Image (cartoon, rainbow, N blue to C red):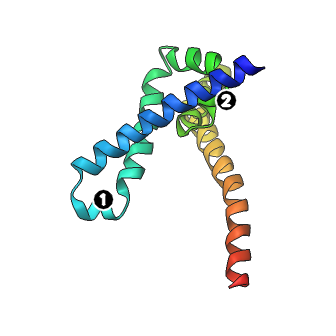
């Protein structure tokens, strides 16, 4: 168990460093007003997702995820990998690109929706507490 946790922390840490490099890169390249609006964070996350989608077909993403477990799955790239896996699975079972895309969107909206619920509850508590 300690070995699995160590691997997860190592992979998660590497993903954090990669994400931070993207943040620094975009903060240096984007014009100052865009950096002030924190768009560099959005671009970094989108780039991380695209990097995952590029590494997924080769099997590299799966190999890193198999070795590092939750360290890889808890990052934004894990969401992109989950969507890519969902797409491939639905396409393989149904042969329909439209159904595969639909299930990919359904997965994203389900995860985002579930993630929004605790944030909304905390926001309501804070709003009424102030």
* Quarter in which the C terminus is drawn: bottom right
Q: Relative to 59, is 123 on the left or the right?
A: right
Residue sitting nearer the eye, 99 or 127: 127
Q: Alpha-carbon distance for marks 2 and 1? A: 31 Å
Residue sitting nearer the eye, 116 or 9: 9
Which residue shows up at 25% across the image and 65% down it? 33
Residue behind mark 2: 70
Q: Relative to 76, is 7 on the left or the right?
A: right
Q: Looking at the image, is 7 positioned above or below residue 110?
A: above
Q: Looking at the image, is 84 positioned above or below residue 125?
A: above
Q: Secondary structure at mark 1?
A: helix
**Residue 96 appearing in the image:** no
Asked if the residue at tag 1 contacts the one at tag 2, i.e. Cβ–Cβ closer than 8 Å, the answer is no
The total number of labels drawn is 2
Q: Looking at the image, is 100 positioned above or below residue 35?
A: above
Which residue shows up at 53% across the image and 21% down it? 61
Residue behind mark 1: 35
Which residue shows up at 63% across the image and 21% down it? 7
Residue sitting nearer the eye, 16 or 79: 16
Q: Secondary structure at mark 2?
A: helix
Specify the quadrant of the image occupied by residue 67. Answer: top right
What is the crowding at mark 2: few (fewer than 14 residues within 10 Å), some, or many (at least 20)?
some
Q: Which mark is residue 22?
A: none
Residue 95 on image: x %, y %: 61, 23
């Amino acid at each position: 168990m300690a070995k699995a946790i160590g691997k997860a922390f190592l992979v998660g840490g590497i993903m954090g460093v990669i994400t931070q490099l993207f943040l620094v890169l975009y903060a240096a390249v984007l014009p100052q007003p865009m950096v002030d609006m924190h768009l560099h964070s959005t671009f970094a996350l989108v780039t991380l997702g695209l990097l995952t989608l590029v590494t997924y077909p080769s099997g590299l993403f799966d190999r890193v995820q198999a070795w590092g477990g939750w360290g890889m799955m808890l990052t934004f790239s894990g969401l992109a990998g989950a969507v890519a896996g969902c797409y491939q699975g639905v396409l393989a079972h149904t042969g329909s690109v439209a159904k595969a895309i639909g299930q990919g969107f359904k997965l994203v909206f389900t995860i985002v929706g579930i993630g929004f619920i605790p944030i909304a509850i905390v926001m309501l508590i804070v709003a009424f507490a102030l």
